[in-house]
Amino acid sequence: MERKTAVIPPEKLAAQTEYCEKIAALWRREGRTPLAFVDTYGCQQNEADSERIRGMLRESGYAMGESEEGADVVVINTCAIREHAEQRVYGNVGALVHAKRRHPGQKIFVCGCMMGQPAAAERMKKSYRHVDGVFNPHQLWRFPELLYSVLTQKKRVFATESSDGAICEGIPVERQSSLKAWVSIMYGCNNFCSYCIVPYVRGRERSRDPEEIVREVEGLIAAGYKDITLLGQNVNSYGKDRDGLPDFADLLARLAELPGEFLLRFMTSHPKDAGKKLFDTMAKYPKIAKQLHLPFQSGNDRVLAAMNRRYDSAHYRELIAYARSVMPDLVLTSDVIVGFPGETEEEFEDTLRLIEEIRYDALFTFIFSPRKGTPAAAMDDPTPKKEKNDRFDRLVKLQDAISAERHRAYVGKTFRVLVDGRDGDLLTARTEGGRLVRFSGADGLIGSFQSVTVTDHTTWSLVGALAEQERDHE
Ligand code: SAH
Ligand code: SF4
Ligand code: F3S
């Protein structure tokens, strides 16, 4: 296979670093520290992008604020996955006009997946005149140059050139947490599920160099990070876009062999690519969390085919059975779409049956939202909205009962948890499977792994107590 993945040359990134320095110099001349606010909509990939935006802002001399009020620059990092997400963005960007009036020097940028759609970028340009700059996900690394231009030339900027995107290594990152970190291992998606906008706005799959990934993870471990999540729209495709790269399971194994006390997670896996090798690797390494997010979307084979998912429900069931056979305590979560065009009551019931049978720890449930330009948006969709809402409610009710049952099963068991903060009187922690546990303990435990025995549960979280051994050492 020819090498298709483009990498931004280091000298181009160095030019961006120079823009950061020029911006910092502008503010030094003003004699004050400017304030920035970055607001994120959407998935972990977008959160990870926002951490890079904050990194570039920090390097340009900005301090981070908590709201748009009084901020010198506001960046809205948008999501296009469902219409509701887009409506929120239009509403909130519209409302920024007031904050800007109160702070006239404020510069407003809108970026992210929505801006990967030419029509949405055009709407920002025409109807939201208080927005100073727009850039799509492929242009993110050029943010310092765009900001400098807006600050110095009093002109609006629109960096929306369509491209399949390239990989940019070395953008500064300002992480939100000192314990948990996202590491993007690849960008884009090639799957074109018929309902999904992501491949259109984030371009083709491109994998980072494994050496870069290892270096980043080693750096995180050395800095004390304990919970590291590898990110990609379909991590199981890692390495397939060019010759000579390891596959995802091998990359995971290599990272899990690094010294230090930490847990590795990953998302998202696609059932057409995840398989025995991945599950065996997860089972083999204690440093890989026994947690799997494996979206199934629908339990009906006609619907799965119409979604272009390229697996059937029997294959999905086999995968789960194998994963559970090698990891009996696996925590399993999934995504499901209700009301895909033409989904009948019987087809929906196949989805309920699959949920009842598999018994997920948690589900992310969505009502189908037509996305312009995707094949599903043009499909016949005769089911009334009321009926879709009704299906959605039935599904949520079923899952709530299963979640409560799964939580009940935790009571009396002891888990290794990572203590990540405090909520009122109690410490908060996550189990290896990502479940929230609250328990009483000293602040000094924050940032460490502890053993906690679960004593009670609610629908969403667990209550526990430090296991005897640790309490003695307090
Ligand atoms: N790459 C990941 C997730 C992408 S988006 C994956 O393939 O699993 C997260 C979830 O949003 C999807 O799994 C799907 O359940 C949901 N989703 C995506 N497009 C949607 C749409 N048009 N309407 C409703 N839900 C959608
Ligand atoms: Fe969208 Fe499918 Fe790609 Fe996930 S795998 S991002 S659902 S096209
Ligand atoms: Fe994520 Fe939304 Fe983009 S889910 S990839 S931010 S469209």
Image (tube, rainbow, N blue to C red):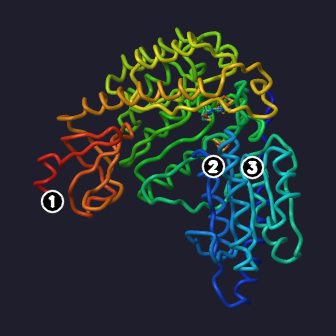
- Residue 157 picture location, percent across and down: 86, 63
Mark 2 burial class by Cα count in 10 Å: few <14, some 14-19, many 20+: some
Which residue does the image show at 70% across and 43% down from the upper left? Answer: 80
- Residue 9 picture location, percent across and down: 79, 53
- Residue 438 picture location, percent across and down: 27, 50
Q: Quadrant of residue 195?
A: top right
- State whether label 2 is within 8 Å of ligand 3: yes
Are dots 3 and 2 in contact, CB under 8 Å?
A: no
Q: Provide the secondary structure element on which disc 3 rests.
A: helix
Upstream in sequence: badge 2 or badge 1:
2
Q: Amino acid at mark 2?
A: Asn
Q: Nearer the viewer, residue 439 or 82?
A: 82
Residue bearing the label numbered 2: 46
Can you tell which of label 2 and label 1 is closer to the viewer? Answer: 2
Q: Provide the secondary structure element on which disc 1 rests.
A: loop
Which residue does the image show at 38% across and 49% down from the upper left? Answer: 260
In the rendered view, does 397 fall on the left or right side of 446?
right
Residue bearing the label numbered 3: 137
Q: Is residue 323 above or below residue 236?
A: above
Q: Give the label on residue 474, or none.
A: 1
Q: Amino acid at mark 1?
A: Glu
Q: Amino acid at mark 3?
A: Pro
